[in-house]
């Protein structure tokens, strides 16, 4: 028999009962009612209570959100309706937004956000890098301005000089991080973009980006350490290492986030860890193959639950849930390191952030 | 202005004669029923398994209780 709708538009004081009439049976598909709390003295939840013929309560089905005194609500009950997720929340601190680049010579590069949307209140951490001198005698160029397709402003960080001093043509890279203001207009994956501009043209421009989110709002990224600029010893070695500094996260659910950038014409071979350096976890690696050099830009984290999201039909990406407690010092330790089989005569550098 | 709220009920909530569906309001702290809340515009969408007249379910006068097909009045 087709479903039927039973209506009772008139107002009644709660509780209002509907009793299944004698010798009948119904299967409930959906219920709806308006609850007017204009006379209520306290906050309340609309509730559907099923009472057995003997008077026992067989079930109570309470709306997911409450109505304040004086308020009212239209409530629908049905199977499978759920807007509030059960269990733990998902307070990610970092979420990848992808890496891309171009080997051509130009003064800007635009990266389309990948993997996930950026929500209101999030921030975006952008790493932009390129060799600073595209042709002989050109003045060195650093990433200078960052914005996105929704017009948010980005604060530039210090420039890291993973290059000779003075720099050689298309050798090494200058890396600069930019941190967005709290996002006002959401950024949609595969639609919205991030653009970084250089003061003049360069080759091999690439952008890697992450969203930063904190359950309590006001997410921050603070650079707390970096390996030395223009470091010839690191250039000749096959590896780069950096102590994780003594640092006290100011709030719960923080994490440390590091990037290791390495650049070399012809590639760097394979990579691995360095004995004695542990604690930072690298879930995956990222690279960009330009027209002048090959670039590894590998992220790693400390103090986080790192999750790889494997969406069907798409590349895996990483999100990180911060676990460091606020106000508890993390002493310095041998933290971030990367060794490359072809790492000799490659410029390399590590930067560590506290994501709070 | 009314908020739009959702609640979840089980799939196949199959009720025989004598079962009561009660619309009520419970205190968010104590769980006790809250007085002075008014319920209106109640709608039940049900599979009337046995057929027959469900009109007497609310126990009040006929005009306030009108079974209609789910597709419309």
Image (cartoon, rainbow, N blue to C red):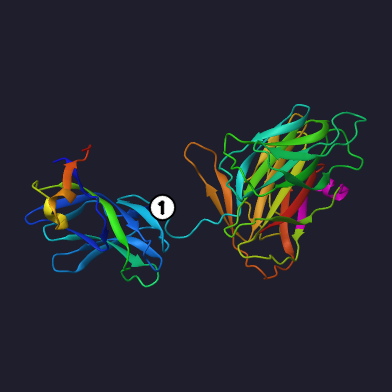
Residue extent of the magenta highlight? A230-242
Chain to which mark 1 belongs: B
- Whether residue B65 can be seen here: no
Left or right relative to B4: residue B41 = left
Residue nearer the viewer, A62 or A253: A62
Residue nearer the viewer, A237 or A114: A114
* Residue that carries the numbered disc 1 in the rendered image: B3
- Whether residue A250 can be seen here: yes
- Residue A193, by quadrant, is top right
**Residue A157 percent across, percent down from the top left:** 78, 49
Residue nearer the viewer, B51 or A86: B51
Please name the residue shown 59% across and 38% down the image: A114
**Residue A118 percent across, percent down from the top left:** 59, 45
Left or right relative to A341: residue B63 = left
Q: Quadrant of the N terminus of chain A?
A: top left
**Residue A322 percent across, percent down from the top left:** 60, 59
- Secondary element at tag 1: strand
Please name the residue shown 38% across and 56% down the image: A72
Please name the residue shown 66% across and 52% down the image: A300
Left or right relative to A18: residue A162 = right
Of all residues, the one furthest to the left in this rendering is A23
- Residue A219, by quadrant, is bottom right
Q: Is residue A161 above or below residue B33?
A: above
Q: Quadrant of the C terminus of chain A?
A: bottom right
Left or right relative to A11: residue B60 = left
**Residue A314 percent across, percent down from the top left:** 52, 37
Badge 1: few (under 14), some or many (20 or more) residues near its Cα, within 10 Å? some
What is the number of callouts on the image? 1
Q: Is residue A121 above or below residue A130?
A: below
- Residue A105, by quadrant, is top right
């Amino acid at each position: 028999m087709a479903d039927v709708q039973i209506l009772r538009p008139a107002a009644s004081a709660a509780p209002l009962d509907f009793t299944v009439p004698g010798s009948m049976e119904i299967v409930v598909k959906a219920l709806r009612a308006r609850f007017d709390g204009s006379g209520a003295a306290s906050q309340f939840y609309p509730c559907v209570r099923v009472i057995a013929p003997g008077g026992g309560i067989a079930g109570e089905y309470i709306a997911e959100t409450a109505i304040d005194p004086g308020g009212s609500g239209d409530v629908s009950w049905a199977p499978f309706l759920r807007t509030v997720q059960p269990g733990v929340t998902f307070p990610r601190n970092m979420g990848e937004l992808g890496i891309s680049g171009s080997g051509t010579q130009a003064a800007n590069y635009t990266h389309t956000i990948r993997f996930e949307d950026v929500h209101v209140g999030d921030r975006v951490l952008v790493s932009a890098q390129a060799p600073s001198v595209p042709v002989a005698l050109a003045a060195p160029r650093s990433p200078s301005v960052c914005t996105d397709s929704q017009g948010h402003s980005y604060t530039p960080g210090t420039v890291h000089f993973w290059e000779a001093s003075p720099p050689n043509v298309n050798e090494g890279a200058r890396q600069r991080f930019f941190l967005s203001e709290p996002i006002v207009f959401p950024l949609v994956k595969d639609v919205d973009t991030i653009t970084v501009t250089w003061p003049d043209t360069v080759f091999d421009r690439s952008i890697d980006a992450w969203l930063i989110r904190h359950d309590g709002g006001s997410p921050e990224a603070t650079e707390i350490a970096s390996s030395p600029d223009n470091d010839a010893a690191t250039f000749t070695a096959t590896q780069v290492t950096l102590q994780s500094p003594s640092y006290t996260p100011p709030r719960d659910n923080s994490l440390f986030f590091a990037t290791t950038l390495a650049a070399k014409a012809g590639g760097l071979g394979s990579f691995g860890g360095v004995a004695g350096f542990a604690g930072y976890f690298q879930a995956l690696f990222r690279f960009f193959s330009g027209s002048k050099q090959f670039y590894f830009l590998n992220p790693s984290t400390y103090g986080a639950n790192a999750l790889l999201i494997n969406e069907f039909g798409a590349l895996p990406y990483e999100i990180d849930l911060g676990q460091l407690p606020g106000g508890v010092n993390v002493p310095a330790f041998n933290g971030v390191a990367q060794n490359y089989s072809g790492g000799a005569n490659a410029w390399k550098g590590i930067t560590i952030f506290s994501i709070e | 202005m009314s908020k739009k709220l959702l609640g979840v009920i089980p799939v196949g909530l199959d009720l025989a004669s004598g079962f009561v569906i009660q619309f009520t309001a419970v205190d968010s702290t104590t769980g006790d029923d809250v007085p002075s809340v008014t319920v209106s515009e109640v709608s039940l969408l049900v599979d009337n398994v046995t057929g027959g007249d469900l009109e007497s379910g609310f126990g009040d006068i006929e005009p306030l209780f009108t079974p209609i097909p789910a597709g419309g009045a």
